Image (spheres, helix red, strand yellow):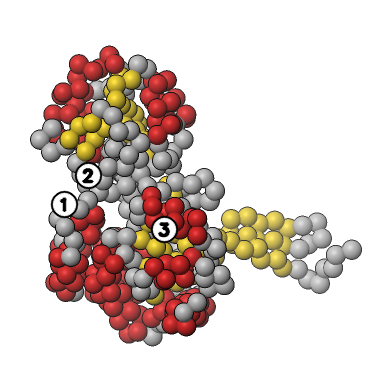
């Protein structure tokens, strides 16, 4: 490993030990100060972001993800304050017992230590990951995409400035270079990085999973479906489908494919009316995450076919049914294998802040470990504390 990269990992590991000594009150105070600093430096944040935006084609689907606005900056600060107000996920006793010999066992929640996050053109991720990691006692090592270089560098500068003023090791957040070598270094940093979380395209996630020697939690790409059932309410359907598709087309919870029961095909034009001037409709090309103003449409014969089709094409992220038939809805929710399964609600709600988690470090689509939006609880592990009075094992 390159000596400079190894030094960064060593500094992060050392910072993780010091972070354990902070109280929850200390961590909350820092998060609130960082939130204030974000708002106070809004113009500088926008200036840095404008440099990144100038290097990207406005027609690129990633442009919206890269772009920061005054409203988004205020939202980032608000989410950080929300995280500060949440209960600490640390020191929670999740299991306890006393053995017949008097030995007392406690299973207690603790940080992972150092969490590496590899992500693409999403500068808000820098702030969200720091807030969640810091609150949960974890150091974060960040590898952002080159598209967001200036935005990420300035974000880390703001955060580290507050850490220094609070006499806390600034390496509690570490920004790696944007090089491919830095990505490879995180994935193979055994002994330094306790967990790696990729956020981005299917290509990025596959690369991390296939090349990592450290543990990985996949935050999967979203191939998202909504099924409008024969008993779906037309007005609800119009609002839900439009919001799921057009709220932000580039994010992973955006709608990619609409399924409509054959008995309601006559209502298709009305269902699509709110978005018809913006969205391109396709009656093929299934199984794609569009990340654009494109939508696949399929007419299905039955609920059975809808479930089967979704199971074949879903990425396991978010799926929704629109129906007034509770039996159909409950069956859909039971049989669809995804992290988030909705009934009469748009998939745009798959988001850590919307779930009351303050923010999210990613949306896990895997089944081993966390699943769905990952907040504070999902980035802690546990250890056993054993107490006795001199007992020995026979």
Q: Foreground residue, 328 or 125?
A: 125
Image coords of residue 294 (percent x, y): 21, 38
Spatial CA distance of label 2 from label 3 is 21 Å
Q: What separation in Å lies between label 1 and label 3 (alpha carbons)? A: 25 Å
Q: Which mark is residue 59?
A: 1
Q: Is residue 308 visible?
A: yes
Q: Is residue 7 above or below residue 293?
A: below
Task: Read off the residue under disc 3.
Answer: 198
Mark 1 falls on what kind of element? loop
**Residue 271 image position (x, y, % from top left):** 19, 26
In primary-sequence order, the first of circles 1 and 2 is 1
Which marked residue is nearer to the observer: mark 1 or mark 3? 1
Q: Say which element carries label 3.
A: strand
Q: On the image, numbered disc 2 is attached to which residue?
A: 292
Q: Residue 375 location in percent, x, y?
A: 41, 56
Q: Residue at x 34, y 70 (%)?
A: 178
- Viewer-closest of 376 and 62: 62
Residue lying farthest top? Answer: 263
| Residue count near mark 2 (Cα–Cα under 10 Å), binned few <14, some 14–19, many ≥20 | many
Return the x and y of residue 164 as percentages of the image width and height: 35, 84
Residue at 13%, 38% in the rendered image: 278
Q: Is residue 386 left or right of residue 12?
A: right
């Amino acid at each position: 490993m390159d000596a400079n990269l190894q030094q960064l990992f060593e500094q992060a590991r050392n910072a993780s030990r010091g972070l354990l000594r902070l109280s929850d009150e200390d961590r909350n105070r820092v998060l609130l100060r960082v939130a204030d600093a974000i708002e106070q430096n809004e113009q500088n944040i926008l200036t840095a972001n404008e440099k990144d935006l100038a290097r990207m084609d406005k027609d690129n689907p990633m442009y919206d993800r890269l772009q920061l606005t005054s409203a988004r900056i205020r939202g980032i600060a608000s989410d950080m304050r929300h995280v500060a107000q949440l209960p600490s996920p640390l020191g929670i006793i999740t299991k306890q017992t006393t053995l017949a010999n008097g030995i007392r066992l406690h299973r207690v929640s603790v940080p992972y230590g150092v969490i590496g996050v590899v992500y693409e053109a999403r500068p808000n991720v820098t702030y969200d990951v720091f807030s969640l990691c810091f609150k949960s006692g974890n150091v974060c090592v960040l590898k952002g995409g080159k598209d967001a270089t200036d935005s990420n560098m300035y974000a880390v500068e703001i955060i580290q400035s507050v850490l220094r003023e609070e006499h806390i090791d600034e390496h509690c957040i570490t920004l790696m270079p944007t090089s491919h070598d830095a990505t490879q270094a995180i994935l193979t940093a055994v002994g330094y990085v306790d967990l790696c979380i990729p956020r981005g395209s299917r290509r990025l996630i596959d690369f991390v999973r296939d090349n990592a020697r450290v543990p990985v939690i996949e935050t999967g790409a979203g191939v998202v479906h909504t099924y409008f059932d024969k008993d779906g309410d037309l007005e609800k359907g119009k609002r839900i489908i439009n919001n799921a598709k057009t709220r932000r087309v580039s994010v992973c919870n955006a709608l990619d494919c609409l399924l409509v029961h054959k008995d309601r095909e006559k209502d298709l034009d009305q269902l699509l009316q709110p978005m018809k001037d913006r969205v391109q409709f396709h009656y093929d090309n299934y199984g794609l995450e569009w990340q654009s103003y494109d939508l696949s449409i399929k007419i299905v014969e039955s609920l059975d076919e809808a479930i089967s089709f979704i199971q074949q094409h879903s990425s396991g992220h978010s799926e929704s049914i629109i129906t007034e038939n509770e039996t159909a809805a409950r069956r859909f929710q039971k049989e669809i294998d995804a992290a988030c399964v909705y009934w009469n609600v748009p998939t745009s709600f798959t988001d850590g802040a919307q779930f009351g988690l303050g923010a999210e470090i990613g949306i896990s689509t895997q089944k081993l470990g966390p699943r769905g939006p990952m907040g504070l609880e999902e980035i802690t592990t546990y250890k056993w504390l054993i107490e006795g009075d001199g007992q020995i094992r026979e």
